[in-house]
């Protein structure tokens, strides 16, 4: 069993590898039976690690960006990470903030749940809540 400090490092590495475009590292960092508690971002994605890899392939192709880790708290096998996602230079930088909770077992991500702050992005693309 890994320590909370080691688990936080796994999550930081996960975001760093994604940002570097190294999706092959997900074989090492993510359990094959990974559970994401959100519906797939795109219909038809397979479950588990395979679906997560496909999702990041799509993101890299259309909206590559980076994740800035703002805060982390860990207890036992759970890691809460607050991140800010920055988009590519070709798109407006949303700076969307998300809070992600990952369960880490034996150095691998096995479960995920998150909340995104969409108001910033919606405002940037012209959504007016008053209308």
Image (cartoon, rainbow, N blue to C red):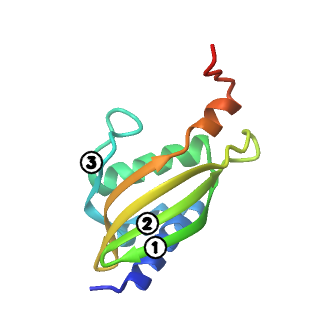
The answer to whether residue 115 is left or right of residue 104 is right
Q: Which of marks 2 and 3 is in front?
A: 2
Q: Nearer the viewer, mark 3 or mark 1?
A: 1
**First-in-chain label (3 vs 1):** 3
The local secondary structure at tag 1 comes to strand
Distance of mark 2 from mark 3, alpha carbons? 22 Å
**First-in-chain label (2 vs 1):** 1
Which residue appears at 67% of the width and 49% of the height?
95
The answer to whether residue 92 is left or right of residue 122 is right
The image position of residue 53, as x and y in percent, is 41, 54
The crowd level at tag 3 (other Cα within 10 Å; few <14, some 14-19, many 20+) is some
Distance of mark 2 from mark 1, alpha carbons? 5 Å
Distance of mark 3 from mark 1, alpha carbons? 27 Å
The crowd level at tag 2 (other Cα within 10 Å; few <14, some 14-19, many 20+) is many
Give residue 63's quadrant in the image. Answer: top right
Front residue of 43/12: it is 12
**First-in-chain label (2 vs 3):** 3
Which residue appears at 32% of the width and 53% of the height?
50
The image position of residue 77, as x and y in percent, is 30, 75
Give residue 107's quadrant in the image. Answer: bottom left
Q: Are the residues at dot 2 and dot 1 in contact (C-beta closer than 8 Å)?
A: yes
- In the rendered image, the quadrant that contains the C terminus is top right
- Name the residue furthest front: 130
Front residue of 129/54: it is 129
Residue bearing the label numbered 2:
80
Residue bearing the label numbered 3:
47
Residue bearing the label numbered 1:
73
Which residue appears at 50% of the width and 71% of the height?
72
């Amino acid at each position: 069993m890994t320590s909370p400090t080691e688990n936080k490092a796994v999550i930081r590495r996960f975001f760093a590898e994604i940002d570097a475009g190294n999706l092959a590292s997900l074989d090492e960092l993510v359990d094959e039976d990974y559970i994401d508690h959100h519906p797939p971002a795109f219909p038809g994605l397979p479950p588990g690690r395979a679906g997560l890899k496909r999702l990041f392939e799509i993101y890299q192709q259309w909206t590559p960006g980076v994740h800035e880790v703002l805060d982390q708290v860990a207890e036992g096998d759970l890691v809460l990470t607050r991140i800010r996602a920055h988009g590519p230079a070709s798109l407006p930088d949303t700076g969307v903030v998300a809070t992600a909770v990952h369960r880490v077992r034996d150095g691998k991500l096995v479960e995920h749940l998150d909340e995104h702050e969409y108001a910033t992005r919606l405002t940037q693309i012209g959504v007016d809540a008053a209308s």
